[in-house]
């Protein structure tokens, strides 16, 4: 296996029916691309020595879960062992983003500096809310500060240098 980086697009949460369909909790912003017929994904699971390449045959959205059937499997007995697995794509198949759009793993771990030049901490997670994302920054003192991903707060994101400049609005700390 080469040292290709892979990025998760879905989690196998359960089987569906008896014809080899799987329930997938999608974690991609591009489900119509990832789960379209003919799309190739890599299935990672603890009981696999290496990832399997799978091909989407059918996929449909049911409530908040995708029901996906892979061409390689025809019944529940063949797929049951993959519950808990991850569906991933290689780095070179990431979809290019627009300006001011970022992949979570480009942001997590970045240092956050205030617009006054003080090191605030580093981004430890991103919470998706209805209105806008919230970046959770672990401060030097070990506490967390929640920064809304809005123009007034996040002033500059420099992914290559892993540095974010933020205006800490009154009352956030």
Image: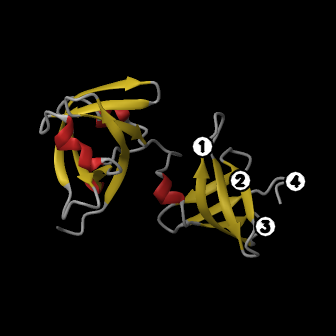
The x, y position of residue 64, in whole percent, is 46, 29
The first of marks 4 and 3 along the sequence is: 3
Q: Residues within 10 Å of mark 1 (few under 14, many from 20)?
A: few
In three-dimensional space, the C-alpha distance between marks 2 and 4, rounded to whole angstroms, equals 11 Å
Q: Residues within 10 Å of mark 4 (few under 14, many from 20)?
A: few
The first of marks 1 and 4 along the sequence is: 1
In three-dimensional space, the C-alpha distance between marks 2 and 3, rounded to whole angstroms, equals 16 Å
Give the structural element (helix, strand or loop) at label 1.
Answer: loop
The x, y position of residue 46, in whole percent, is 29, 61
Residue where numbered disc 1 is placed: 128
Q: Which mark is residue 144?
A: none
In three-dimensional space, the C-alpha distance between marks 4 and 3, rounded to whole angstroms, equals 14 Å
In three-dimensional space, the C-alpha distance between marks 2 and 1, rounded to whole angstroms, equals 12 Å
Residue where numbered disc 2 is placed: 147
- Which picture quadrant has residue 146? bottom right
Give the structural element (helix, strand or loop) at label 2.
Answer: strand
| Quarter of the figure with the C terminus | bottom right
The first of marks 2 and 1 along the sequence is: 1
Numbered-mark total: 4
Q: Most extreme residue toward the right, as rendered?
A: 171
| Quarter of the figure with the N terminus | bottom left
Q: Residue at x 60, y 43 (%)?
A: 128
Front: mark 2 or 1: 1
Residue where numbered disc 4 is placed: 170
Front: mark 4 or 3: 4
Front: mark 3 or 1: 1
Give the side of residue 114 with respect to residue 11, left or right: right
In three-dimensional space, the C-alpha distance between marks 3 and 1, rounded to whole angstroms, equals 27 Å
- Which picture quadrant has residue 47? bottom left
Give the structural element (helix, strand or loop) at label 3.
Answer: loop
Residue where numbered disc 3 is placed: 116
Give the side of residue 9 with respect to residue 99, left or right: left
């Amino acid at each position: 296996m080469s040292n290709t980086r892979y990025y998760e697009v879905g989690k196998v949460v359960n089987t569906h029916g008896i014809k080899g369909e799987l329930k997938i909790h999608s974690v991609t912003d591009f489900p119509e691309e990832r789960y379209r017929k003919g799309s190739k994904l890599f299935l990672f699971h603890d009981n696999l020595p290496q990832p399997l390449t799978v091909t989407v045959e059918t996929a449909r959205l049911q409530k908040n879960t995708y029901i996906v059937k892979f061409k390689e499997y025809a019944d529940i007995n063949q797929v049951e062992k993959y519950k808990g697995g991850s569906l991933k794509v290689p780095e070179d198949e990431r979809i290019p983003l627009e300006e001011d759009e970022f992949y979570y793993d480009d942001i997590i771990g970045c240092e956050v500096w205030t617009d006054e030049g003080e090191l605030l901490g580093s981004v430890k997670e991103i919470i998706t809310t209805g209105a806008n994302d919230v970046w959770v920054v672990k401060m030097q003192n070990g506490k967390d500060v929640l920064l809304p991903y809005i123009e007034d707060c996040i002033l500059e994101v420099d992914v290559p240098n892993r540095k974010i400049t933020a205006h800490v609005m009154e009352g956030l700390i």
